[in-house]
Amino acid sequence: MADAEANEKHLSSLHRSQRASFIRSLVAVKAIALNTFKETVRDRVLYAIIIFALLATLAGLIFGSLSVDQDVRVLEDLGLFTITIFGGIISIFVGTNLVFKEIDRRTIFLIATKPINRWEFIAGKFFGLALCILVTNFAMGFFLIGISALQTGSLNHLFSLLIALVFIYVELLLVIALATFFSTFATPLMSMVFTLSLWISGHLSNSLLSLGKLSTQASVQLMTKAVYYTLPDLASLTFMRSELVDKVPPFSAFAAIVAYVLAYCVLLLTLASMIAERKEFN
């Protein structure tokens, strides 16, 4: 009886300790994320990129006026493309400097003296930039929706545009995760090159697979298949987003592609945390 009570008390104490550790981790991640968000939104380069993106969206009005009965389609397609490209530029530019800035300014040593795990540091940096991209992504998106509404005099495409913005944001989360991963072991310049290369390759993975099927060499076909299944399939995101003008995809397809990309993000952040745990900052 006494042993049972002792075991129960031990389990209860263990559960309390685990809850306290979980809460402490959440507080640490939140603090780092908010600090990263504040630092990012104070960057003047961010606003210059956003202004340029808004001007590029307005250019869609000019290109749309040159088409026949496709002015709204051209405006929305160009607007969504602009949001994706400039959102990606922000994600790569800021994300690849996340860890390097802390090392360059020596603030990483101050962080290291605090009871913060490396994975909490990586997660906080990721979520801070993800919050910044969320704000900028939907700010540019609502600007596009406003222009489209003025052009058509209605909000018929509101829902499809909102879903398209969600697709864009999910894609940008992957870009942030790639940039965060590479920033843990490479210089900012090399991180930019690696991140940009994988981002573009993810959109070309289907073409690579089709090209491999044209080869008569079994080794080439096997290699292209391996590369195809390793790279994130961003082409599906783009295809589904382009179809939104005509129809809304079923929820199952929407959930599957979002879960697929988020799984990649989790994998990349896990690898980044493992590298950061073994990295000696000097």
Image (spheres, helix red, strand yellow):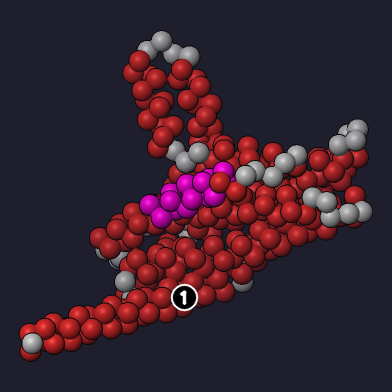
Q: Extreme front residue here?
A: 1
Residue 109 is one of the magenta-drawn residues? no
Could you tell me the amino acid type at mark 1? Lys
Which quarter of the figure has residue 228?
top left
Give the residue number, with chain letter if any, for mark 1.
30
Q: Position of residue 71 (x, y in %)?
A: 87, 40
Horizontal side of 277 relative to 87 (left or right) equals: left
Q: Residues within 10 Å of mark 1 (few under 14, many from 20)?
A: some
Quadrant location, the N terminus: bottom left
Residue 264 is one of the magenta-drawn residues? yes
- Residue span colored magenta: 253-268
Q: Nearer the viewer, residue 252 or 64?
A: 252
Q: Nearer the viewer, residue 210 or 40?
A: 210
Quadrant location, the C terminus: bottom left
* Residue 87 seen in this snapshot: no
**Compared to 271, does 196 lie above or below?**
above
Q: Which SS does the magenta portion mostly show?
A: helix
Residue visible at 69% across and 39% down in the picture: 242
Q: Secondary structure at mark 1?
A: helix
